[in-house]
Image (spheres, rainbow, N blue to C red):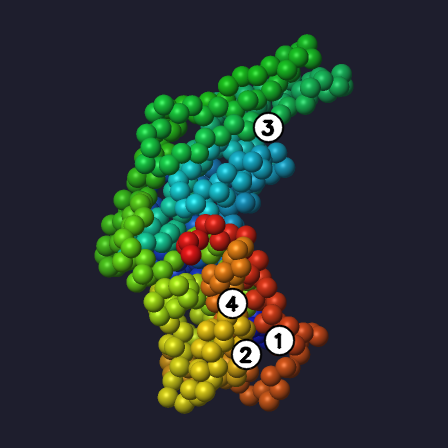
Amino acid sequence: MPLERTKHEGSRMWGGASKQKQVEESLSRPYSDGVREALDHCKYNFVITDPFLMDHPIVYASEGFFKMTGYSRGEVLGRNSRFLQGPDTDRRTVLQIREAIRQEKSCQVTILNYKKDGARFWNLFHLAPVFSKDEGRVIHFIGVQTPLRQCSQHESSASANINANASNNLIYFGSCRREVCRDFSVDLDHSRLQNSCTEDDHKGRVVKHACEAKESDKQNAIAAISCVMSELSLFSKYSGKSVSDTRCDSADLVRVAPSISSSLTIALSRIPQSFVLVDPHLPEMPIVHASNSFLQLTGYSRDEVLGKNCRILQGQDTDQEDISKIRQSIEAEQPCTVRILNYRKNDTPFWNLLHTAPVRNASGKVAFYVGVQLDVTGMEDNNHSDKGMTSQMKQLGAVGAVRVAVRSLLGAGPSK
């Protein structure tokens, strides 16, 4: 795939039409037809996100979610859930959710969110991962939202008191920010979800009162997760790709279908260039991540690439001397650049300016190899420039971005 396409091709790849197609296909790949209609019967406020698409977007949202937030379907699908955050959303709670995603675990927190019209509401947010039984990796996340009306009533009362006494320079209303993060498999009956909220008591004193999620709220969140997981599990069986709310820990499965953490996947998905990440510590050095640009260039789907060796791009006229150069560079743990003839899924050949480089962890050991592709078919000068950037500069930039992502998040990935 070109490291950087032409302006027209780039806008098509990252434009609305392409993004919409990726969002639509996100549920159709692991589940059979009808899954969306079945999910519509789950009368809860929830979204489903895809960590393998750029910026971890929402790929499904329930009617209850639209009514709760005031957003339309077109304003939600394809966007990251951060649009619900606002100026008083507690950043520690957001980081707690991100950490749960990084660890691929369930999480339940109370968080201050905002509707489309700017109205604030307290939300009991329950996050749960969806694992592929065949591959042992997370393929989706479910996020259930339960408005905590009693908390919002406390806040409204406190805000009214503060506004009434603003002229006397009395206390400012603080954000509720006590949260609980628990594994989905753990019984939540004994957990108390409290937020320390402050309000003025008409005498300038700060009064704290508990902002507690009711037992019914907690049970509704669990029921919502159960309902959604039940539908996803059912329709995944129809497609022959079963899913589960727990990870398969089979060592044999990991060798056959290697995976990296969802947090690293999300970070890598933000890199627009065409590249793959391979694991040299597994048999056959399989691909463990492929960028959307790579899939666009080669015509393969993600499922057809992950776990495969890069030789799938080779064909009858691929020069074996180029292959030998790449192998020698890997053995020497050195970068390498070759102009090699590769083939797309439909057997169409293209000239690939391929740059490979080792990606090391914090201790200096090679954790992965990255291969950055640039389509130079019909170009005589491999170092052509675009907006002042040469091919080498673009490829080195992509390698640098991959290294930053891996070093910052390798703790969540496979141990070496």
- Which residue is labeled 4 in the image? 358
Mark 2 or 1: the one toward you = 2
Give percent across and percent down for residue 389: 67, 74
Marks 3 and 4 sit apart, C-alpha to C-alpha, by 46 Å
Looking at marks 3 and 4 on the same chain, the residue that comes earlier in the sequence is marked by 3
The amino acid on which the numbered mark 4 sits, given as a three-letter code, is Pro
The amino acid on which the numbered mark 3 sits, given as a three-letter code, is Ser
- Which residue is labeled 2 in the image? 337
Marks 2 and 4 sit apart, C-alpha to C-alpha, by 12 Å
- Which residue is labeled 1 in the image? 392
Mark 3 or 4: the one toward you = 4
SS at circle 1: helix
Looking at marks 1 and 4 on the same chain, the residue that comes earlier in the sequence is marked by 4
Up-down relation of residue 173 to residue 375 (above or below): above
- Quadrant location of the C terminus? bottom left
Q: Report if the CB atoms under discs 1 and 4 are less than 8 Å apart.
A: no
Using the image as rendered, state which of residue 383 and residue 224 is in the foreground.
383
SS at circle 3: loop
Mark 2 or 4: the one toward you = 4
SS at circle 4: strand
The amino acid on which the numbered mark 1 sits, given as a three-letter code, is Gln
- Which residue is labeled 3 in the image? 175
Up-down relation of residue 262 to residue 128 (above or below): below
